């Protein structure tokens, strides 16, 4: 009797549990002596489902709430309720650099201030007082920064240039964030330096909310690293014989910003075989090896149960 862990996700806005269940059902229909375990792992709804049992952590995902001002208000409510908040998101189609999130978090309306800079400094100060209550995070599914040529303010999610970019506002916003950035501690007698909050990896996530959280002293962490710690990933892998990962688009450029490498690296430490299931794949044999994948199954029609059966025929025989 063997054990298989079926993990991953199927689209950021889609609940991954039905897909994981169907793959497990298909697998066990062909290999009834195997035990199948499911573990949602990835961005969006998968992140929310993976953290469902952690009542002390308030997960706020852009996959469930697109209004960043509302998201900021909920982040504030979570802190006041004594919970540890984490806003989760990636490279969004619409972004204002984090302005709406800061408005919701601080509770200060921009409409009540005649001067944008005055509102900004007041909102930052109000938010810093609030955030002193405990730990707070931004989890990112895209490591792109807020500012720069490859940033979320410069490029759309499909990596085409944004045609609605307001260069003057972006410069103003970058200057304001720089002024309130936390200084880095000096090393070996060197003077303290300021880390540009809008150029940190992941700072462009969630419409720029991640950059605001960084400015306030919060921690930016990738979805994969956050889930690895909070879901005891390595201990779960130690109990199984095979790992199946659902990742919709199996293409090298996409995988570079996915959580799949987190799963394959954890499996490699235990010499576990990894089977990737996707909608479509362009991976060569060499690329599969680079990503730590031992086999690939695809189905553009998304027949998860049949995919599970196909997986069992090869890997559980």
Image: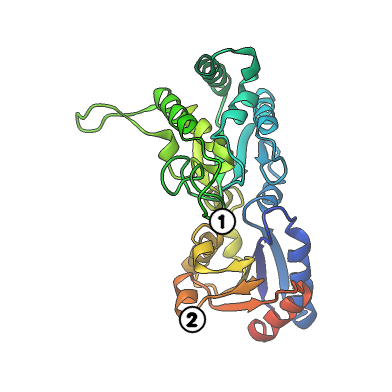
Spatial CA distance of label 1 from label 2 is 26 Å
Residue visible at 55% across and 58% down in the picture: 258
In which quadrant of the rendered view does residue 9 lie? bottom right
In which quadrant of the rendered view does residue 307 lie? bottom right
Against 159, is 95 above or below?
above
Residue positioned most to the front: 163
Q: Residues within 10 Å of mark 1 (few under 14, many from 20)?
A: few
Q: In which quarter of the image is the C terminus?
A: bottom right
Q: What element carries label 1?
A: loop
Against 153, is 133 above or below?
above
Which residue has dot 2 on it? Answer: 285
Against 99, is 158 above or below?
below
Residue visible at 66% across and 43% down in the picture: 62
Residue 238, x across and y down, in percent: 57, 65
Q: Residues within 10 Å of mark 2 (few under 14, many from 20)?
A: few
Residue 97, x across and y down, in percent: 54, 35
């Amino acid at each position: 009797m063997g054990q298989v862990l079926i993990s991953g996700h199927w689209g950021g806005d889609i609940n991954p549990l039905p897909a994981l269940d169907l793959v497990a059902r298909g697998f066990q229909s062909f290999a009834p002596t195997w035990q199948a375990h499911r573990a949602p792992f990835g961005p969006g709804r998968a992140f929310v489902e993976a953290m469902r049992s952690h009542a002390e952590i308030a997960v706020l995902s852009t996959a469930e709430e697109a209004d960043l001002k509302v998201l900021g208000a909920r982040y504030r409510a979570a802190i006041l309720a004594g919970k540890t908040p984490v806003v989760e998101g990636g490279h969004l189609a619409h972004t204002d650099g984090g302005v709406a999130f800061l408005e919701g978090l601080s509770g200060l309306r921009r409409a009540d201030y005649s001067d944008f800079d005055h509102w900004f400094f007041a909102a930052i100060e109000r938010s810093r007082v609030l955030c002193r209550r405990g730990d707070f995070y931004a989890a990112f599914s895209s490591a792109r920064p807020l500012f720069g040529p490859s940033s979320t303010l410069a490029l759309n999610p499909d990596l085409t240039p944004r045609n609605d970019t307001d260069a003057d506002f972006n410069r103003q916003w970058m200057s304001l964030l720089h002024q309130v950035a936390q200084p880095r501690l000096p090393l070996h007698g060197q003077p303290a330096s300021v880390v540009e909050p809008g150029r940190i990896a992941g700072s462009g996530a969630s419409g720029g909310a991640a950059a605001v959280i960084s400015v306030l002293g919060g921690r930016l962490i990738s979805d994969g690293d956050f889930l690895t710690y909070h879901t005891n990933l390595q201990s779960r892998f130690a109990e199984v014989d095979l790992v199946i990962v659902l990742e919709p688009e199996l293409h090298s450029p996409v995988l570079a910003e996915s959580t799949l490498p987190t799963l394959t690296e954890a499996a490699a430490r235990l010499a576990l075989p990894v089977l990737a299931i996707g909608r479509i794949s362009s991976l060569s044999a060499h690329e599969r090896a680079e990503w730590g994948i031992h086999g690939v199954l695809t189905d553009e029609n998304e027949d998860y149960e049949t995919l599970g059966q196909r997986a069992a025929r090869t890997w559980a025989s």
